[in-house]
Image (cartoon, helix red, strand yellow):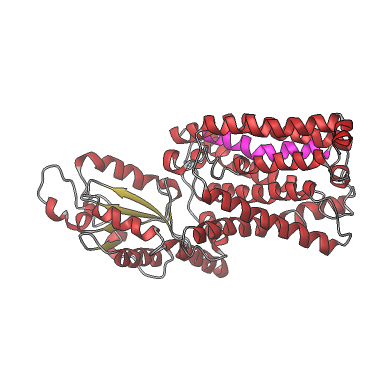
Amino acid sequence: MRLIKKLVSMARRRSPWLFHLNTGGCNGCDIEFSACLAPRYDVEQAGILLVGSPRHADILCVTGPVTRGTRAALETIYAQMPEPKVVVALGNCPATCDVFAGSPAIEGPLDRILPVDVYVPGCPPRPHDLIKGVAQAVAILADQQPRDRRIIEGVNQ
Amino acid sequence: MSWEKVFFALLIFPGLLYAVPTAWLMLWLERKFRARMQGRIGPPFYQPFFDFVKLMAKRRVLRPSFDSIFMMGLPLVSVSAGLLALALLPISSDSRGFAGDLVLLVAFLEVPSLCSVLAGFASRSIFGQVGATREAILSITYNLPFLTAIVALAYSAQSLRLVDIAASPAGGVRALAVLTICLCLPVKLRINPFSVSNAEQEIYSGPATEFSGPQLAMWELAHGLEWVALTGLVVCLGLTFRTGTWIGDFAIYTSLSLVLVILLTILATGTARLKIQQAARFYWRWGMGLSLVALILGVFPDIERFIR
């Protein structure tokens, strides 16, 4: 049983599949995100794949402050992902709403709506930081790094 | 065929014990070669194995009971059809087969495609339904030349036994028929330029869009087994000699299948996706043309002798 647990943890560490969602950001973070998949950073070396369906994904990468129009889609997509799953907030927008803070059209920041596991600050963050953030998320997936207690108890929501 | 031989073929070689690692190896080779051709480094060789373990360990999504029976059953049927197809291949020179095993093999090779059509509709996702429709249309277009080529092979060997076809003398009919089957490989494996049914930029993963966790793992495995079975079919039918020893046959069969995988990957990486009309036109013009010539040569062997 312990061997199987170890194998599963190893597998989760080595094959994280990402689903990427823009919730009304300026597209800056998304361009940096796609740079990770291109030859220079090539995250497929670490087994990271970008998948098109939330049903296949392990990690939800969210960019943008959550606007009114995208909130329902965000919640549906989060609910569609099978457990275990981890949420990564890419850039300043999902963390603090950045320059959009205070706008009546914004429902963010992201942690009002979903439990966020990893924050990657920057406007936009560099691809290195992004990869570092995904690596942290992967450690949480593989149970090697404890989750923030507040997230487990649901205080964030 | 004795029972021990049947079990050996199903469970050890070329069945479960050989086919599953080879399926993972082929899936890795495809991804690795694609990455290298795009100037990337690509995943390590254990990647498909860990993907499989990870997907198996994901928690299940709750669905209405009837849907969940379909969604778990279809990928399992697809995997078992792949294994059964593999068990029928006449790889070593001492395999005997039985009368009509060619028909059974063709049926088993068609099951994954059929399952994927059903799965697309069973998942009730719009992307799955579009993917399933495309898969169904494509299956009509490629099966016409594919089946004509198989009929030509069977007619020229005057037998429906795979062993007899593999042992028949090399000639124009066999070369043309195997070439037609090779032409049908990319569309049967759903890779570029014929990746119409799982076009990831248009309809996500097509029929597999709604599948998650263990079900998706089974689809991946079924896809890997399709690679093993189809490349194996081409090698078995195209190879005109057997070494006589078990080890020699095994080595030649495996290495030629891997070479075929690399060639198909180069084709897939070097081309862009065609529209469904273009794919259909290609198969009905070139595939049908080639296989009809093979069939005519097979029915009237005098023509080939006359040309020689």
Q: x%, y% of residue B294?
A: 78, 34
Please state if B222 lies on the left or on the right of B16 as rendered.
Answer: left
Please state if A156 lies on the left or on the right of B10 as rendered.
Answer: left
Please state if B267 lies on the left or on the right of A35 as rendered.
Answer: right
B131 lies above or below A2:
above
Q: x%, y% of residue B79?
A: 65, 46
Where does the magenta region start and end? B101-120
B19 lies above or below B71:
below
Tell me the quarter of the image containing the N terminus of chain A. bottom right
Who's the residue at 57% across and 42% down the image?
B190
Who's the residue at 45% across and 35% down the image?
B127
| Quadrant of the rendered image containing residue B101 | top right
Q: Is residue B116 magenta?
A: yes
| Quadrant of the rendered image containing residue B191 | top right
Q: Using the image as rendered, state which of residue B155 and residue B61 is in the foreground.
A: B155
| Quadrant of the rendered image containing residue A39 | bottom left
B53 lies above or below A65:
below
Q: Is residue A119 visible?
A: yes
